[in-house]
Image (cartoon, rainbow, N blue to C red):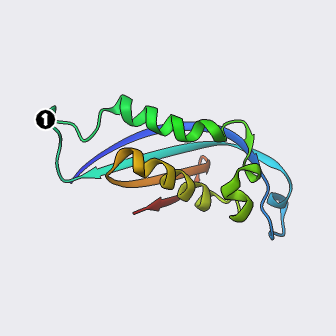
Amino acid sequence: MYEIKVIEEFSGAHNLRNYKGKCESLHGHNWKVEAVLYSGSVNGNGMVLDFKDFRDKLKAVLSPMDHKHLNDIAFFKKENPTSENIARYIHRNLAPAVGKKLKVSVWETGNSCASFKD
């Protein structure tokens, strides 16, 4: 099985609903996002997907979230904007563009992350 990974970042604010603690208040993060594609084969060029193409597709998904209050995005009006749900949101929007098995990890801090994979 082949595996390729790209990493990007975005900055944004959120507040958690139905949460008793500091994260209930509006606050921000510089999220690091790791996207990993898995494939049993490579294309004629010997690649799962060109890194530049993969990175560009991830950037396109992250762009509407960058420097935004995530709670204002339609998906997060229904779903709490936790790192788990942010990973699922990115996965949901990136998967159709890459068409392969995908895992998305969202790092909220340097030592805390949540992942979603199919």
| Picture coordinates of residue 71, whole percent (x, y) | 76, 53
Instruction: Answer few, some or many: residues within 10 Å of disc 1's Cα (few below 14, many 20 plus, some between 14 and 19).
Output: few
Q: Amino acid at mark 1?
A: Gly
x and y percent of residue 49 in the render? 28, 38
- Apparent side of residue 52 relative to residue 87 in the rendered image (left or right): left
Q: Is residue 113 visible?
A: no
Q: Position of residue 75 (x, y in %)?
A: 66, 57
Q: Position of residue 59 (x, y in %)?
A: 52, 35
Task: Give me the residue at 45% from left, 32% from top.
Answer: 56
Q: Quadrant of the N terminus?
A: bottom left
Q: Which residue is mark 1?
A: 44
Which residue occupies the extreme left position in the image?
44
Q: Is residue 92 above or below residue 29?
A: below
Q: Which residue is outermost to the top?
A: 52
The front one of 72 and 7 is 72
Q: Residue at x 42, y 51 (%)?
A: 95
Q: Eyeballing the image, is 62 above or below 1?
A: above
Q: Quadrant of the C terminus?
A: bottom left
Count of numbered tags: 1
Residue 116 visible? The answer is yes
Instruction: Write down the quadrant of residue 32 in the picture.
Output: top right
Image side of residue 14 versus residue 11, left or right:
right
Left or right placement of residue 53 versus residue 90 in this view: left
Kindly state the secondary structure of the residue where label 1 is placed. Answer: loop
User: Residue, x 45% and y 37% (percent of image)?
Assistant: 57
